[in-house]
Image (tube, rainbow, N blue to C red):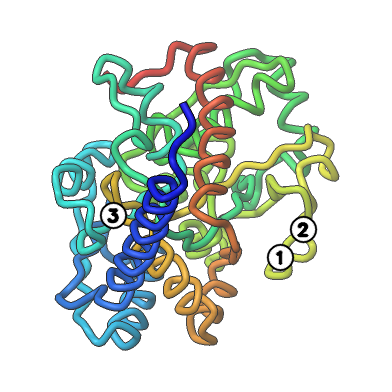
């Protein structure tokens, strides 16, 4: 049936008015946010690299927003202590959560019985940084290249050991990927403390480990560790003499972790966009970039949607690795 012209005109006017109202509401949300303190929970311990960056960024946000931005550390429990503290909070931007890519992409595969998918409960709000991982051995190790590690593992399956800072960590899953790509079998040794891990690598208790620059540089600077490769597509300025995995005779691998801010799902788009833009502005500040340079953290310009796509890509890889060795934290 043809709608009479006056009725159609009224309908169009109503649609236009609704659109205008929605636009005005979005602008009001953006303008009003935040009008009270914001709390950012983090799954990382005080003094860690992600915590140090978050505290710097939170100071910048406090000035930009003219509101207190509080940091609450909730480490442990595979990330679930922090997750549980935030998941039932209102989706209004006043409670955010700092997680890494493994919390986003690996948890569903490590805790299958929980039926928990991080990005069905939370949505990305902003990217903070990405960190690459180096393959470290003891300073006096016989291994000079990744090819040496692979050859030894093929010659004696299960005898070459590697450490990590826990089951399901990037160090563990990166080691599983190296084995999968090279057809080798190595023994995984998980540690509860990062400092203990690199002390053991330096002492030769385990043959090697992946490690980020901030977590391993203490042992490296003390002359206990040697980096034989970086698991990235290219070398980094902080360690220009350290070759990539491929250059060191191994497979071309990209072992990294990225750190983000997420919010309970349902965050208004205007608030999400403001958080994203203001975090990007904070990260670009010279003192934050200086900290990034010290830690070899990489600045990224990912949108919230891109964060989701990158997490999905990691989830696919982690799912394959978890299934291959029946890796679980349950």
Image spot of residue 238 (x, y percent): 68, 69
- Taking depth in this image into account, of 147 and 124 the one nearest to the observer is 124
Q: Secondary structure at mark 1?
A: loop
Tag 1–tag 2 contact (CB < 8 Å): yes
- Taking depth in this image into account, of 94 and 176 the one nearest to the observer is 94
How far apart marks 3 and 1 lie (CA) works out to 31 Å
**Which residue corresponds to mark 1?**
239
Residue 235 got which mark?
2
Q: Secondary structure at mark 3?
A: strand
Q: Residue at 50%, 57% (x, y): give it.
A: 216
Of the image marks 3 and 1, the number of the one nearer the N terminus: 3
Rendered view: 106 above or below 294: above
Image quadrant in which the C terminus is located: top left
The crowding category of the residue bearing disc 1, from other C-alpha atoms within 10 Å (few below 14, some 14 to 19, many at least 20), is some
How far apart marks 1 and 2 lie (CA) works out to 7 Å
Question: Which marked residue is nearer to the observer: mark 3 or mark 1?
Answer: 3
Q: Residue at 62%, 42% (x, y): give it.
A: 255
Judged left or right of residue 70, residue 240 is right
How far apart marks 2 and 3 lie (CA) works out to 31 Å
Rendered view: 152 above or below 265: above
Tag 3–tag 1 contact (CB < 8 Å): no
Residue 97 got which mark?
3
Image spot of residue 241 (x, y percent): 79, 62
Rendered view: 296 above or below 216: below
- Taking depth in this image into account, of 51 and 274 the one nearest to the observer is 274
Quarter of image, res 269: bottom left
Question: Which marked residue is nearer to the observer: mark 2 or mark 3?
Answer: 3
Image spot of residue 252 (x, y percent): 78, 37
């Amino acid at each position: 049936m043809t709608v009479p012209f006056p009725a159609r005109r009224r309908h169009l006017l109503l649609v236009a008015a609704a659109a205008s109202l929605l636009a005005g509401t979005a602008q009001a949300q953006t303008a009003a946010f935040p009008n009270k303190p914001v709390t950012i929970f983090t799954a990382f311990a005080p003094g860690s690299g992600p915590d140090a960056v978050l505290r710097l960024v939170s100071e910048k946000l406090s000035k930009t927003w003219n509101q207190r931005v509080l940091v609450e550390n909730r480490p442990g429990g595979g990330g679930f202590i922090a997750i549980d503290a935030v998941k039932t909070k209102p989706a209004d931007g006043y409670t955010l959560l700092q997680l890494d890519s493994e919390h986003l992409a690996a948890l569903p595969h490590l805790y299958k019985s929980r039926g928990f998918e991080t990005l069905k409960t939370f949505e990305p709000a902003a990217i903070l940084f990405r960190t690459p991982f180096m393959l470290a051995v003891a300073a006096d190790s016989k291994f000079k290249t990744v090819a040496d590690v692979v050859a030894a593992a093929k010659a004696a399956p299960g005898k070459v050991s590697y450490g990590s800072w826990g089951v399901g960590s990037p160090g563990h899953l990166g080691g599983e990927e190296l084995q999968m790509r090279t057809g080798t079998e190595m023994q995984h040794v998980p540690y509860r403390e990062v400092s203990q891990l690199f002390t053991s690598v330096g002492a030769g208790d385990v043959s090697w480990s992946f490690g980020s620059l901030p977590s391993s540089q203490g042992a490296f600077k003390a002359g206990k560790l040697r980096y034989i490769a970086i698991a990235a597509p290219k070398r980094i300025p902080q360690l220009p003499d350290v070759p990539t995995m491929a250059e060191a005779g191994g497979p071309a691998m990209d072992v990294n972790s990225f750190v983000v801010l997420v919010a309970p799902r349902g965050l208004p788009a205007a608030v999400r966009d403001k958080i994203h833009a203001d975090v990007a502005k904070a990260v670009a500040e010279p003192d934050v970039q200086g900290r990034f340079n010290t830690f070899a953290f990489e600045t990224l310009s990912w949108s919230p949607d891109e964060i989701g796509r990158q997490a999905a890509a990691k989830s696919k890889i982690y799912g394959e690795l978890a299934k291959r060795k029946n890796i679980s934290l349950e």
